[in-house]
C-alpha cells in the first residue's frame, strides 16, 4: 500500500486521535482482512515504513524439523525447504512472505474498508468513553436537541450526543429544545 502513513496521519488529524493509535488500528484491520480473505489459521504481521510511507503485510510460516508431524507447507515448512530459500534459517525461525491484498480483488477491498471503518470507529468510541468516565461524579452541562413523544430527552454534551429517559428525571420536570 502506497502512502498509507499519509492516510493514517490524515485520519488522526481529522478525528483528533494519536497517530500511533490509528496506525495500530489500521494494522489490526489489515491483519483481520487477511484472515478473512486469505486464511484464518495463518499468522500475519503488518509493518509501516515511515520513510517510504508504505504498508507491508507479511505471512509467517514457521520452520520445523524435516520429520515434524505438523508439516503442511501452509503453516509450517521443513528446515530442508526453508534452507533452499535462506541458508541462515534454523528450526523455530519464521519465514516471511510479503502479501498484497490488491491481488485478492474487490472482496478484499470491501472487507478492508469495513475493517478500517470498524476499528477507527471503535477507537473513537474508546476515546469518548475514557473522556467521560473521567467525569463520573462531576456535573456536566448539555443542550437539549430534541424531546421524543415518550418524553425521552436528547442532549448534546460537547461532541457527544446522549439521551435521558423520563424515568431518570425529576418528577414533573419538562424540557424543550434549547434548554441546558
Image (spheres, helix red, strand yellow):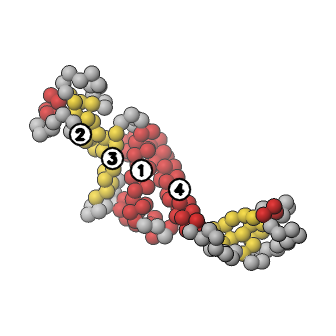
Q: Is residue 46 above or below residue 60?
A: below
User: Mark 3 touching mark 2, by CB under 8 A?
Assistant: no
Instruction: Locate residue 56, reporting x and y percent.
Output: 31, 51
Q: How far is the residue under mark 4 from the one under mark 3?
A: 21 Å
x, y percentage for residue 62?
A: 26, 35
148 left or right, relative to 21: right
Q: Which residue is mark 2?
A: 94
Q: Residues within 10 Å of mark 3 (few under 14, many from 20)?
A: some
Secondary structure at badge 2 equals strand
Q: Does dot 4 land on a helix, a strand or a loop?
A: helix
CA–CA distance in space, label 3 to label 2: 11 Å
Residue linked to disc 1: 28
Q: Is disc 1 in contact with disc 3, using a CB cutoff of under 8 Å?
A: no
Circle nearer the N terminus (1, 2): 1
Q: Secondary structure at mark 1?
A: helix
- On residue 122, which mark appears? 4
Q: CA distance from mark 1 to mark 3?
A: 9 Å
Residue 19, placed above or below residue 105: below
Amino acid at each position: 500500500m502506497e502512502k498509507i502513513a499519509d492516510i493514517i496521519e490524515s485520519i488522526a488529524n481529522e478525528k483528533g486521535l494519536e497517530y500511533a493509535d490509528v496506525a495500530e488500528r489500521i494494522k489490526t484491520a489489515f491483519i483481520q482482512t487477511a484472515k478473512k480473505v486469505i486464511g484464518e489459521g495463518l499468522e500475519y504481521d503488518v509493518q509501516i515504513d515511515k520513510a517510504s510511507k508504505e504498508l507491508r503485510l507479511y505471512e509467517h510460516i514457521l520452520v520445523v524439523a524435516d520429520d515434524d508431524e505438523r508439516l503442511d507447507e501452509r503453516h509450517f515448512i521443513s528446515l530442508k525447504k526453508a534452507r533452499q530459500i535462506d541458508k541462515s534459517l534454523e528450526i523455530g525461525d519464521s519465514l516471511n512472505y510479503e502479501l498484497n491484498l490488491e491481488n485478492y480483488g474487490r472482496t478484499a477491498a470491501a472487507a478492508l474498508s469495513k475493517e478500517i471503518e470498524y476499528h477507527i470507529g471503535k477507537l473513537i468510541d474508546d476515546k469518548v468513553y475514557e473522556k467521560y468516565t473521567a467525569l463520573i461524579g462531576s456535573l456536566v452541562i448539555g443542550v437539549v436537541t430534541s424531546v421524543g413523544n415518550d418524553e425521552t430527552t436528547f442532549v448534546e454534551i460537547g461532541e457527544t450526543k446522549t439521551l435521558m429517559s423520563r424515568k431518570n428525571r425529576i418528577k414533573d420536570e419538562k424540557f424543550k429544545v434549547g434548554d441546558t
